[in-house]
Each structure stands twice: as C-alpha cells, then as structure tokens.
Amino acid sequence: MRTSKFFIATQKEVPAEAEIVSHRLMLRASLIRRLSAGIYTWLPLGLRVVRKVEAIVREEMNRAGAIELAMPVVQPGELWRESGRWQAYGPELLRFKDRHEREFVIQPTSEEVVTDLARSELKSYRQLPVHFYQIQSKFRDERRPRFGIMRGREFVMKDGYSFHADYRDLEREYHNMYDTYTRIFSRLGLKFRAVAADTGAIGGTGSHEFHVLAESGEDAIAFCPQSDYAANVELAEALSPATRPAAKETMRKVPTPGMTKCEAVAELLKLPLTRTVKAVAVMHDEQFILLLVRGDHELNEIKAQKVIGLFRFATEGEIQRHLHCPAGYIGPVGAKVRMVADRTVAAMADFVCGANQEGYHLAGVNWGRDASEPEVADIRNVVAGDPSPDGKGKLDIVRGIEVGHIFQLRTKYSEAMGATFLDEKGAARPFEMGCYGIGVTRIVGAAIEQNHDARGIIFPAAIAPFSACIVPIGYHKSTAVREAAERVYAELGAAGIDVLLEDREERPGVLFADMDLIGIPHRIVVGERGLAAGNAEYKARRDDKGSDVPLASAAALLLKKLA
RNA sequence: CGGGGUGUGGCGCAGACUGGUAGCGCGCCUGCUUUGGGAGCAGGAUGUCGGAGGUUCAAAUCCUCUCACCCCGACCA
C-alpha cells in the first residue's frame, strides 16, 4: 500500500474528549473517529488492526474445533422474554419496536438465538458436542460509555456457545477454550493473565476472565507471584489470620467530635489504621445488620451478599432507629442487632470502634468481654500482602483490562427455553452449555494501552495495521531514491508482507512522525545519504537508533524479522 | 439516574462577568524558498457562535426552554 493512495489523517493536537492514552492515540493516529457517545467509525487504519485481531481469533477458534456462523444483530423480544432476560437485563438492553409494533432488541450477546437454533437443529446426542461462534457487532446501552473504544456502546465481539450432552464434556470444552484463549492472547503479543472470576448475573458455575495487564485497567486482579494463583479481587478469598491475641487493655471511651472516619480517629489516638474497625449498616429484607471490616479494608459486597443474602445500605434514619446515633459513630459494642465480622476483625484485640454515641469512639475493645462474639465470615476485598489462598505465598494486586471471559452456563438457558436433545436411552435432556467471549475491538485499545511511548503507538507485530514501512527521503526529487524504494517495496510485496510505502510529498520529519505515531513495527529508510554507500537504514519502532543495512539485503532482513 | 461542566471555522481554544456584530494556534488552499525528525515567508478561504424563543436600538455575551457531548458517582458484565 502507498500512503498517497491510503487514508491517513493523523493529528498533532488531541481532541479534548480523550481521557486515556489509547483513546488519545487512536484518535491522533486516525484509527477511529467518534460519531456519537460510545459509537465510533473505524477508519481504514484502525479497521486493519481489527481485521488482524479477528483473523487470529478466527484461526484459533477454528483450530479448536469451533464452527463459525452469524446470528442476527436484531432479535425478537419474544426470545428474550422466554429466557427471562427481557426483565433481567435492564436498560443496557436496547429495545425497540418495528412498524408492526413488535418488540425487538439489538443483541448485546446471543444466548437466546443460539439456544433457539440448538433446540430446533440439535435433536440427538449423536450431534453433540457442537460449538458455534460468531464475530460481529454488539450493542450495550452503557449508562456511561468511556475510554473510547474500550467501553463503547457498539463494539465487536467474538462470542461462542458450546452444547454438550453432559457436564464432563462441557468441562472438557471449557479447558479447550482456556487453552485456546491463552494461545490467542499469546499470539496477539499481549501481556495477560487468566483469572478466576465471579459468575455475575449471567449465572452458571465455573468462569475465568482474561485480562490484559495495564495500569489504566478498570479491574483489579489478585495474583500470587510464587504460584499460578490469580483471581478477580471480588472473588479472591481473604484467609483467616492467626488466632486472636489476648486482651491487654481495658475499654475506654474517647471523645472524637466530628471524626466519622477511621482515618481521623486513628490519627487522633496515634494508632495505625489496622487497629480500627469500621461498621457498615445494611438492610436485608427488613433486618438491620452490621458488617464489620478493619479500618484499612474494603467491604466486598458480593462476598457479603453470599453470607446474608441480597442487601442494601441502611439509611441514616434506619441507623438512628436501631443504634440511636449517626452513621459515623456506630460499632459492635452494645448493639443488639445481627453482626457479621470479617475474619480479620474477629481476630483483633484491643481495637477501636464507634461507641454508638455521637462524638465518641471506644478504644481497647475486645470480643467476648466488651462485645458479644460476632458471626464470622470473609466479607472483604483482599489487599496486597495477604496470604495467597493456595497457601503458596503472598498476594499482589495489578490492574487489568478484561478482554476475554469464559463461562460454564450449564443448563440455565436450555432449561428456560426448553432446548433438549435425546440421549442414548431416548430421554429428553437439556443441553449443558458453555459460553466464551472475546472483546475484539477492546483488544485494540488494550494493546495500545500496553504498548506505546511518547511518540505514539508501538503495535505488536501480529496486529499492526502494516507490518513494515519504507520511508524514502526525497522520493519525489531523486530518481535513485525512488527506484531503490520501489525495488524494496516490490520485493516485500512479492513476499506477501503488508508493507506501506511512504510516497507522500511531505518533509521527512512529517513522514517519520506519522509512521511512529501509527506504530508500524519495522521501518526501512532509503535516502541519498545511505544510498551512496549502497545502504538503507533499518529501525524497529521500539529501538532508539537505526542501523545501516545493504540495500540489496534490506528486504531479506525484514523477512527474517517478520518470520 | 444524581451532581458538575462544555458547546464559537476541520481540530484545540480565547472572547461572555462589564451587550456594540468574532479572534488566536494548528490544519486547509496558492506562490516562492526549504527538504534525514511534525519547515519559513507572503497571500488566501472557511463561522446560521448547538437549536428555539425572549429582553434590548443592538445578543456569542443577559433570561427561559431544549438538544448534544464530556467528567465524577451510582448502575451493569
């Protein structure tokens, strides 16, 4: 491809809307343009990257035995009512009516349609297992789209659905997909981590997320450097600490006017935050419950929900009614309500907590003696330094961008929608199902988030819009330069390399800056200076300096680099 | 959905408080010079100031309504 015949619309200045690096660079490098909130046009350069990601995903899915199909973007609301998700999904599901007033949705995912397909096409265990997948546009009406393509409303996803006669076979395919995803993200050239995940609202049992590691990631991942343990922080278990030390202090009341935060109280008493306990008041049905976590810890709502059931935070009025003081001063001492303490809290002695009296806290508090022994459970988020749940070291926490997710759906949809097959004995049984997603367009953003420098994007070779570029200095002035550049260009083209020839009539600085910004991994510069000695210059995008290579072997060198 | 903010040429912004009919940088066009890291000079084009209504002799500027977008939070996977 010649740049003069392609569409490159790079910008020096950054549109004000862009918050994170990848978004800024994608706009500046002319990969995307925003059309509406969370909705983007993929410009030719960006689309090439998307296509390369798709190609790798497709190749590996096919290799793993999955079969590609394409399901409609517009789907009848009826099917969604059948699965129960018409109600369950909420406003993220974009719904509309056609001219006959029939309800439709724009698919955020395709469990309903694929299950409908299975129940009409797959009749016998002899046809199983089957794994269908598609790569196409999805729409989720996010309340707040952000970070450009990373959390857009319209996006491209690879979604696959597998059907099995029994759970064993689903597990087999689940592991097959785990391996396939690992291979896909490795081939994409990304630093990533597979983590155990919560199954969330979609239901089912086993689930893993694949995260591209990046500072700007929206998710926190707990992992153990000493082992292969990794889990979403929402899921990682916080183990019980050693046994509770003996009480040394007597309980005393301290005035803490205006201090409603543990931080303030700890500072006043010159105690570390780890000696304080904070209480969170919640309501489960009409029951008032105190959840207790250490001052420096964070309540994990998902874990707490598993212990006490669905809950909401108590209102100021409810707290007054049950504990007769404002929220900033509540604590376990003398509270005649249900209390659930985090494991860490249960193992504390001589701690500080609210006195259930406005303007006062209690210090030197001990379980059993000053407050009744609480119910104990794991209800907090793990923090860096916590022991790894597998017992093999300490946890570390990194941030990640979720780019893949695999689920064991089991029979949630097949049962809801009556999708059954006949087994060996002629009995009708619901399909065991698995579901596997990869955020194709999000990968583009994640890759840039992980690979860039001050000059722009540094694309991993596997997904660069072009593998290499030739930048002639004086293409329009020097016949020798033009001929040399054209020769290398032809050689690489003949070898099937995606090569870009910079033949725009611009100053060299502009050409260099654009190729760097766009992130082409390899560059050959042909100029009269080097040509005099029969040389061209090779430079990798990541390198600071280039090196001379004989013009005659420039193409061969690139072929070797790209092999 | 709650809170905050912004809409001015293709992009980034100033002008608004104190009303007087719009300006800067980048980009774009023409010419000359320049040509190994986003050139210089000269000339030029481009604005229903998001939209509607109102106040006023006069509105980008003040008022009302409305639309779009951005940020924080909540929500969602």
Image (tube, coloured by chain):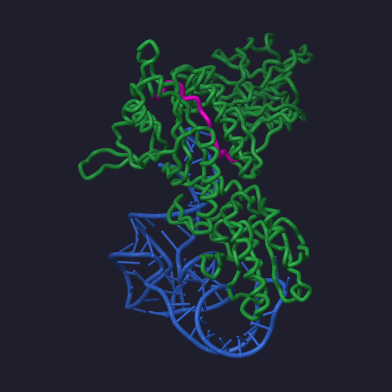
Chain colours: A green, B blue
In the image as oriented, which residue stretches furthest toward the left? A100
Relative side of A392 to A95, left or right: right
Is A402 part of what is drawn in magenta?
yes
Would you place residue A285 above or below residue B29 in this image?
above
A82 or A562, which lies in front?
A562
Front position in the image: A208 or A44: A44
Main secondary structure type of the part rendered in magenta: strand
Whole-percent x, y for residue A335 in the image: 58, 15
Dividing the picture into quadrants, the one containing residue A70 is top left
Which quadrant would residue B52 be assigned to in this image? bottom left
Residue A257 visible in the snapshot:
no
- A285 versus B17 height, above or below: above
Q: Position of residue A347 (x, y in %)?
A: 71, 16
Picture quarter containing residue B37? bottom right
Report whether residue A251 is seen. Answer: yes
Q: Which residues are magenta?
A: A401-413
Image quarter of the N terminus of chain A: bottom right
Instruction: Return the x and y of residue B44 as percentages of the image width and height.
Output: 48, 86
Return the residue nearer the eye: A117 or A104: A117
The image position of residue A78, as x and y in percent, is 29, 32
Residue at left 73%, top 67%? A551
- Tag count in the figure? 0
Q: Going by the image, does A431 lie left or right of B71?
A: left
Task: Decide whether residue A342 is among the magenta residues.
Answer: no
The residue drawn where x is 52% and y is 37% is: A61
